[in-house]
Image: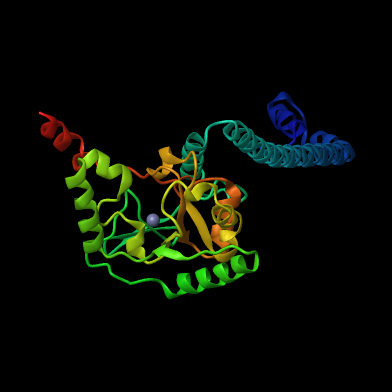
Amino acid sequence: MNEPIWRSIIDDGKDNGITDAEKQQVMSESEPDVEEQQRRIAQELARKRAARQAAEHKRIMKNRLIAVCALVGVVVLAVVAVKAAGGSSKDVKTASSAMSAEAQTKTSGKKADSSSSAPEKQPEPEHKIEQTNGMTFVDDILIVNKTYSLPRDYAPGVSEVAVNAFNRMSAAAAEDGISLWINSSYRSYEEQEALYNSYVEERDRDEADKVSSRPGHSEHQTGLAFDVNDTSFEFEDTDAAGWLREHCCEYGFIIRFPEGKEAFTGYSYEPWHIRYLGKKIATEVTESGLSLEEYLGITSEYPKEDSGEQSSTSEQE
Ligand SMILES: [Zn+2]
């Protein structure tokens, strides 16, 4: 197959009277041409090979360029996507700050669920609710209200820490010419039960609920709550009440049932009832202007099945 075409022509001419000498001559004469031709072919092949290599090189470079472009594109898209995600979360925050406190808590809850892996987000703090031995701690704060109660056998007595804080506070108040004293402090479950039942006998359950806590639901059972001075509404306008409102957080106390917060605390304004939380949290809660329930995102409502509605209705009938 590699046989040049002239050789087959000469071979074919064998029967056409071409002599061997003539053949030899042609062949010898053709020899330089053949060499020339082969050289040209070789050159041509080399040229083609070079062109092919060049084309191949070009193709590889083109592919590399495409790959680099694609990589750059992916990186750019990723950066844009991250920026867009950051921007949209800011939008959500801005929007939610216009919502009510409750709605905001819900939004941030959803946000935390849907994107818990995003580290740069700092949504509203979620409150940790723990229940141990019938007691409820919200962000490590022992909570007692209409929703959360204490077991009958929880009887810690008055908190020494809270009493010491009160004594420091009353000493400071005395320097300002204000007299503060503890009217009522720790109350056991049984004491609260007797007190509440006496109110129920006097009035009815609905009326009793307005002035007294059901047993297990009184903050006095924690040993961390005090009624200061006079537990009547005359106390509200005294200098002592004013001093207490202004300074109690400096000693770790809050006015537990502030004015205008009945919907959250479940109790009307009690200017005399203070609760020990420690200076840091008491100051935070006071400065927030929120009730403890709002601050911790919790409710204060007696359970439906346990409410006085039915019994009071049946009593009326
Ligand atoms: Zn009280």
Q: Residue at x 58, y 48 (%)?
A: 288
Residue 284 vs residue 274: left or right?
A: right
Image location of residue 168, percent across then percent down:
56, 72
Query: Which colour scheme appears in the figure?
Result: rainbow
Q: Between 9 and 220, which is closer to the camera in this rendering?
A: 220
* Quarter assignment of residue 91: top right
In the rendered image, the residue lying farthest to the top is 16
Q: Residue at x 52, y 33 (%)?
A: 100
Image location of residue 93, percent across then percent down:
60, 37
Q: Between 294 and 316, which is closer to the camera in this rendering?
A: 316
* Quarter assignment of residue 310: top left
Is residue 126 visible from the viewing direction of this image? no
Q: Residue at x 56, y 60 (%)?
A: 248
Q: Which quarter of the rendered picture does the N terminus lie within?
A: top right
Image location of residue 76, percent across then percent down:
72, 38
Ligand 1 image position (quadrant): bottom left
Image location of residue 295, percent across then percent down:
50, 48
Relative to residue 237, is residue 226 depicted above or below?
below
Q: Between 216 and 57, which is closer to the camera in this rendering?
A: 216
Relative to residue 260, is residue 155 depicted above or below?
below
Q: Between 141 and 73, which is closer to the camera in this rendering?
A: 141
Relative to residue 108, is residue 317 depicted above or below?
above
Residue 6 vs residue 287: left or right?
A: right
Q: Which quarter of the rendered picture does the C terminus lie within?
A: top left
Residue 67 vs residue 294: left or right?
A: right
